[in-house]
Amino acid sequence: MAGRTMHAVQYDGYGGGAAGLKHVEIQVPSPKKDEVLLRVEAASINPVDWKIQKGVLRPLMRPKFPHVPVTDVAGEVVEVGPGVHSFKPGDKVVSMLDFWNAGGLAEHAVASVNMTVDRPPEVSAAEGASLPIAALTALQALRYSGTMFDGTGQPKNVLITAASGGVGSFAVQLAKLGNLHVTATCGARNVDLVKRLGADEVLDYKTPEGKSLSPSGRKYDVVIHCTVGISWSTFEPNLAANGMVIDITPTPWTWFRSVVKRLTFAKKKLVPLIFVQAKEDLRFLVQLVRDGKLTTVVDSRHRLSEAAAAWAKSMEGHATGKIIVEMGE
């Protein structure tokens, strides 16, 4: 598709928030070796997308400017690069684009075959685009805690914070697939939703009870910590003897406390989660959606022309589930 142009949303440098996004016409990219060109049907915005824009993740992630943001997409293959034999034009797929180049807020995007999987007809573009970062994070956090998803794991008690958010809503469902007893925290308006996702106990995080032991009196073997602003000391009294807190958004202080606990051989552990791009995990999640075992909670849907509103909503930090941007007319 050399020489053709497409509509895209980009920003020219760090900062600016939603106001820093610009609608532009740029050239359709060409796939290189082991890449495919996609016609993007849907993309989902994650907090990491606007954190990159804010420069929070420097020096780990330095985007090339101007930068078309968003990594999580679903669409249709329209062209394959050299060496690609696993996909062909017309294939429906889910992809996670690389953080440095991204490209999701555009009509077309180039994706590596290393993080692209087939999307069956049972999985919509919006459902597929919601999976890569949020559902992979939830899956990897639970796997780190020893959770099995084939019925062979040991029953455990897990606390999931921010359970109505993008990661949390997937974590609740995956934890139940892993035969865990789930206590979840969320805002009062989402308590019924989180119960429908499968949580055994749901607490309003704004109440005193929302920061204490579960109503059933169970201590937590695992905490999947999906929010910010709650310290280790809040969880420690309610952990089981060998319990662990897995922090999906670790700060430098989290890393420091984690190292201290390792050096002192503490039984209760604080684990900063390191996200790994894993194609087989992404394929597994798509299959769960196909089989009706995992559902996407959609906060809102926006057209590409409304990307700034979607961006601002994500930055507010109170979305229920995923924020989706859909392409097309």
Image: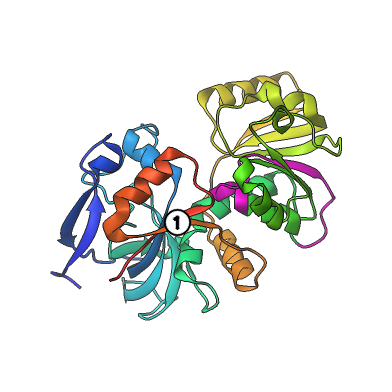
- Label 1 sits on a secondary structure element that is strand
Image position of 139 with respect to 37: above or below:
above
Crowd rating for badge 1 (residues with CA inside 10 Å; few <14, some 14–19, many 20+): some
Left or right of 213? Residue 206 is left
Is 159 inside the magenta-drawn segment? yes
Reply above or below: 319 against 5: above
281 left or right, relative to 75: right
**Which residue appears at 81% of the width and 54% of the height?**
153
Tell me the residue at 23%/44% (across/down): 11
x and y percentages locating residue 157 in the rendered image: 80, 43
Quadrant the N terminus occupies: bottom left
Q: What x and y, as percent, mark residue 44?
A: 43, 56
**Magenta stretch: includes residue 123:** no
Front-most of residues 209 and 129: 209
Q: Return the residue nearer the eye: 148 or 322.
A: 322
Q: In terms of image quadrants, where is residue 306?
A: bottom left
Q: Residue furthest left?
A: 3
Q: Amino acid at mark 1?
A: Ser
The dominant secondary structure in magenta is: loop
Q: Which residues are magenta?
A: 150-169
The residue sitting at 84% across, 49% down in the picture is 155
